[in-house]
Amino acid sequence: MTITITAFDRSPDGGRGLARDTRVRWALEEVGQPYAVRRVTFDALKQPAHLALNPFGQIPTYEDGDLVLFETGAIILHIAERHAGLLPAAADARARAITWMFAAVNTVEPPVIELEIARLFESDKPWASERLPLVEARVRDRLGQLSRRLGGDDWLDGPFSAGDLMMVSVLLRLRSSGLLDEFPSLAAYVVRGEARPAYARAFADQHALNTRP
Amino acid sequence: MTITITAFDRSPDGGRGLARDTRVRWALEEVGQPYAVRRVTFDALKQPAHLALNPFGQIPTYEDGDLVLFETGAIILHIAERHAGLLPAAADARARAITWMFAAVNTVEPPVIELEIARLFESDKPWASERLPLVEARVRDRLGQLSRRLGGDDWLDGPFSAGDLMMVSVLLRLRSSGLLDEFPSLAAYVVRGEARPAYARAFADQHALNTRP
């Protein structure tokens, strides 16, 4: 059975790897599973055929035989449960790694999304310049807490896990804002993630797709 | 071994059940597991003893012997994996239920949080009245998509699952905004969740704690 994921026909980020298919590609590369990619145009995202796969009209989706999943976190957890390489074998360590997956998407990513909305979609509003520092402060609070927990460690809890994959992916969304560089240990953590061969392959594949003629 | 969770010493919502310990209480009630509650003051949330349990200074945390978890989603998944009642036994249905857990916290909850911030923490800002409709529109987009998927079903994918527990809990945060009532099938879905005996017990326990003299 071939795993098929969906990706933007052309990612709005032009191949910088910030669309969420990169996270799923990275996970599949870490565990050595081949996969096919089906491209979806912006128009097709809102059509019934795609909404049947993902009711929120987003990418990525994941298809493997009769199984259809959406939500990056759920897809990555599914991959991690079926193939070695993304979750520790010991039960307690496994539960802690999953904790970091949820922390990435539910505690760190919401203010990151808010910052992107403020910078991209509300930048022409009269409140843009006065409000931006408030939003940045909320992101900094989370980054400060995260950097204190990471300390001098390479990864969040022992060896690299799906929790790190998700957290690095969320933090990558901040790079263009400059906020990440205010926390050198987190910037270095992200660089460690990007240095993994599996990430490099995932990035190269999405980059080739999104920069094709 | 006794399960111990943390909750606010006094929840800022005054016992309306919107603090995240209610979600964990609900899950533990669904599977019939007893638990103890340790109350944490706002000051104690930011102290080293609590930050060792949750680096983001939030409740709830979960302790069971040597295992310490934070993040509501991770805690509920951990409970659901160990006790029957919150996840289907069949592998594909189980993966889809987990998908709804992630959809609740990563796709539906971020705009809900943004709306709460706009209504509670930015209500005195000069942009408050002009910006609120934009934020509400983002919430409505998600609610519309969710209501179309739910259709006339009782729950999101077959029998009640941890995915419904999380989604109902997220939607409950919207009730005071009035937005939920614009989507009658979702309002009815939330009422179905609240009608579960396990939810009623969880709600009553947190209410008693937060309304004590």
Image (cartoon, coloured by chain):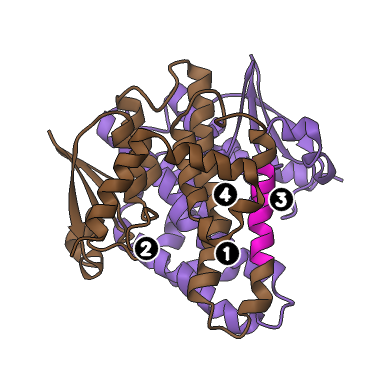
Chain colours: A purple, B brown
User: Is residue A194 among the parts visible in the rendering?
Assistant: no
Marks 3 and 4 share the same chain:
no
Label of residue B108 in the image: 4
How packed is label 3: few (under 14 Cα within 10 Å), some, or many (20 or more)? many
How packed is label 1: few (under 14 Cα within 10 Å), some, or many (20 or more)? many
Of all chains, the one bearing label 2 is B
SS at badge 2 = loop
Q: Is residue A167 left or right of residue B118?
A: left
Q: Earlier in the sequence, mark 4 or mark 2?
A: 2
User: Is residue B205 among the parts visible in the rendering?
Assistant: yes
User: Is residue B11 found inside the magenta-colored segment of the image?
Assistant: no
Q: Amino acid at mark 2?
A: Asp
Q: Position of residue A43 (x, y in %)?
A: 84, 44
Camera-nearest label, 4 or 2: 2
Label 4 close to label 1 by CB (< 8 Å): no
Marks 1 and 3 share the same chain:
yes
How packed is label 4: few (under 14 Cα within 10 Å), some, or many (20 or more)? many
Quadrant that contains the N terminus of chain A: top right
Marks 2 and 3 share the same chain:
no
The Cα atoms of the two marked residues, 3 and 4, are separated by: 26 Å
Label 1 close to label 3 by CB (< 8 Å): no
Q: Position of residue A183 (x, y in %)?
A: 42, 68
Label of residue A114 in the image: 1
Query: What residue is pinned by disc 2?
Result: B13
Give the extent of the magenta segment. B134-146
- Front residue of A93/B70: it is B70
Res A176 quadrant in image? bottom right
Label of residue A15 in the image: 3
The Cα atoms of the two marked residues, 4 and 1, are separated by: 14 Å
How packed is label 2: few (under 14 Cα within 10 Å), some, or many (20 or more)? few
